[in-house]
């Protein structure tokens, strides 16, 4: 059984999942995690493992919700976001076909 990971995930998808759920910038969250990892290595690894396990058990149920930012988006931006999401899906499909 292959676990579903959030879009843009690198390892287990923890930072990407949190960023998607709260509409945060994933790279800022990853930089904060790396900083945490440098100062509190053991606790950072434990926290990441617990969150990764939680995401895999939930199956990404709570990461798909949308916040108020989507309600305020203009029609032009939502159309552009749909096109970008479509292109990302196509690229993922192409990558899976190459495997």
Image: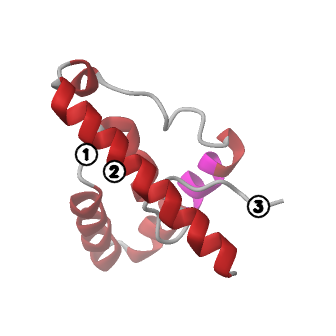
Mark 2 vs 1: CB contact within 8 A: no
Q: Which mark is residue 24?
A: 1
Q: Looking at the image, tell me whether mark 3 or mark 2 is earlier in sequence order.
A: 3
Give the residues drawn in magenta, as a range: 49-55
Helix, strand or loop status at disc 1: loop
Q: Is residue 53 shown in magenta?
A: yes
Residue at the spot of label 2: 84
Helix, strand or loop status at disc 2: helix
C-alpha distance separating marks 2 and 1: 18 Å
Mark 3 vs 2: CB contact within 8 A: no
Q: Looking at the image, tell me whether mark 3 or mark 1 is earlier in sequence order.
A: 3
Q: Which colour scheme is used?
A: secondary structure
Name the foreground residue: 67 vs 14: 67
Residue 19 visible in the picture:
no
Which quarter of the image is occupied by the N terminus?
bottom right
Query: Would you call the spot at circle 1 few (<14 residues within 10 Å), some (14-19), or many (20 or more)?
Result: some
Residue drawn at (25%, 41%), measured in percent from left and top? 80
73 to the left or right of 1: left
C-alpha distance separating marks 3 and 2: 25 Å
Q: Which mark is residue 2?
A: 3
Q: Looking at the image, tell me whether mark 2 or mark 1 is earlier in sequence order.
A: 1
């Amino acid at each position: 059984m292959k676990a579903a990971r959030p879009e843009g995930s690198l390892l287990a998808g923890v930072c990407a999942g949190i960023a998607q759920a709260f509409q945060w910038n994933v790279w800022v969250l990853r930089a904060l995690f790396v900083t945490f990892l440098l100062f509190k290595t053991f606790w950072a690894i434990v926290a990441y493992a617990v969150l990764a396990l939680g995401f895999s058990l939930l199956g990404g149920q709570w990461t798909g919700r949308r916040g108020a930012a989507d309600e305020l988006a203009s029609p032009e931006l939502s159309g552009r976001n749909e096109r970008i999401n479509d292109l990302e899906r196509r690229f993922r499909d192409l990558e899976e076909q190459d495997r």
